[in-house]
Amino acid sequence: MKQTQWWKKAVVYQIYPRSFNDSNGDGIGDIPGITEKLDYLENLGIDVIWLSPVYASPNDDNGYDISDYRAINPEFGTMADFDEMLAQAHARGIKIVMDLVVNHSSDEHEWFIQSRKDRTNPYRDFYFWRDGKNGKPPNNWGSVFSGPAWEFDETTCQYYLHLFTRKQPDLNWENSRVRGEVYDMMRWWLDKGVDGFRMDVISAISKVEGLPDGPIEEGDLYGNFVPYAFNGPRMHEFIREMNREVLSGYDIMTVGETPGVGVEEAKKFANADMSELSMIFQFEHVKLIDENGIKWGDKKICVRELKRVMAKWQNGLEGKAWNSLYWENHDQPRSVSRFGGEGRYWEKSAKTLAVCLHMMQGTPYIYQGQEIGMTNTIFESVRDYRDVEQINAFREYTEELGVSEEDMMRWIAKEGRDNARTPMQWSGAHAAGFTDGEPWIKTNPNYKQINAEKQAGDPDSIFSAYQAMIRLRKKFDVVTDGKFTLLDPDSDKNFSYTRETASEKLLVICSFSEKPITFAVPDDMIDSKILYCNYSPAPSATKELALRPWESVIFYKKRVFTDK
Ligand code: NOJ
């Protein structure tokens, strides 16, 4: 099948179905709810929906624990609802990319039910079963969601590995039957007409033989599995096999979620030769907030560091592999709260974040609500949180690590995943117009000020800024193809860069400051044409440009060549 790489020009919108739109009043978003909102997405201008999991699941981790890969979770609707959504999306020229969660399954998946029955079951080797050591787990690894990464199972007196919750046992990719089952299932969805996959923690599918103990930092309760579970020895081999067996047969888009992967590995994963995936999600820019690898803390983002990391990826993959561009997803806090300014400059900074990201090279992702500047939420009680990661971390930090409840509540409010999972704010009506019933998680109290109804028809809204960025990407090839050069790398007040091809040049200037600043426009861009500004009146490209707080400007020039 010819690979057209259509995804290079595409903009993706991520839907977290549980929180997007509820059509039947049970408080849980659903598939018919998504279908109802396709016109809204068409109006925004996106090309692709990445759908977080809608498969059958006991919901220990909101669908990232799948018990049947070929069934729809009844909370979300039926397979007929899914087919209808896919047909309706395709009728509008919108593609649908599914989440593929195959580093682990649910412990309620038939494979695991069989596997745990006895040591000689044909499915035993679908998972990692090991004997304990002196009454302890087989190694010292801790799970991503607190506690040990091993669970003892009384039926056969062995432990099984789970990098995430105990209800998410890791699949053993060393077993070719596991891989065969996964590839069959992928073909089944692709033959149904879906347009690709986002691959959950795909960088963890190859573990180092022997599963050695991981390093333990002072103060840690468990060893770190990362050196032995991410970027494992057979990772690329497995992905190449998947590419040969499945992906190469379809003109689709694939994006690997690859924590722990740096530029060099990314060049293999997202290589222009298309031997593996279309692109990956790198984590370096969102992990700048971490201290010693831990996300719970008071650290703030340093703009200079953010620029350094983004530029490293832009330049590192240039001409060799393809970038994905994102500020947000269902695992990250809201970008306007994290990178922008929530108060007086909420609107300006949300627009500037859109400009800054969307003019880079790569495929941009918009997470539901980002296009209207949804912010982090504040819950008064830990009981209001729903995310297994936050709930477990709160318990572990306050009960075992001596952190005060006050500190932990502040850190969760800043970095927790539930910030992204509050209901989509459609209007100022009950529950932000998300449901007629009681939402499964509390609505952000600011929905009367921040909602889609207010913004969709307003030419000055954040929504309109996203529409404008999508239009610019479609209109000017330089947005897709241009070489990226970071300007002013040492400034922590502006994030500015150029993009250029032989025939076009863009200058993208983004103030990340609440104070007025000045910016020196490069000589060759003086008097260039303005394509966008988040203030009115827009400035012209003079040598010393005075930037208003969180101002963003895009200048454009057709390049003229004279024969010597
Ligand atoms: C990454 C997903 O994005 C996250 O939501 C999930 O908890 C873990 N992988 C485990 O599947």
Image (cartoon, helix red, strand yellow):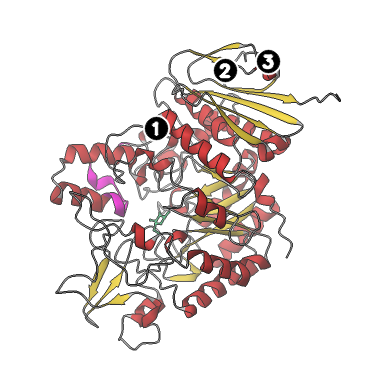
Judge by depth and name the residue closer to the eye, 250 or 192.
Answer: 250
Residue sticking out furthest to the bottom: 120
The 10 Å Cα crowd at callout 1, few under 14, some 14 to 19, many 20 or more, is: many
The answer to whether 341 appears left or right of 237 in the picture is left
Would the CB of label 1 be found within 8 Å of ligand 1?
no
Q: Earlier in the sequence, mark 1 or mark 2?
A: 1
Mark 2 element type: loop
356 drawn magenta: no
> Which amino acid type is marked by label 1?
Ser
Judge by depth and name the residue closer to the eye, 130 or 554.
Answer: 130
> Which amino acid type is marked by label 2?
Tyr
Mark 1 element type: helix
| Residue that carries the numbered disc 1 in the rendered image | 337
Judge by depth and name the residue closer to the eye, 340 or 235.
Answer: 235
Residue 535, numbered circle: 2
Report the mark closest to the observer, 2 or 3. 3
**C-alpha span from label 1 to label 2:** 21 Å
Residue 91 position, x and y percent, is 70, 53
385 drawn magenta: yes
Q: Which residues are magenta?
A: 378-390
| Residue that carries the numbered disc 3 in the rendered image | 526
**C-alpha span from label 3 to label 1:** 34 Å
Q: Residue at x 23, y 47 (%)?
A: 383
Classify the position of the C terminus by image quarter.
Answer: top right
Q: Within the image, what quadrant is residue 432 found in?
A: top left
Q: Earlier in the sequence, mark 3 or mark 1?
A: 1
Report the image quarter containing ligand 1: bottom left
Residue 249 position, x and y percent, is 67, 68
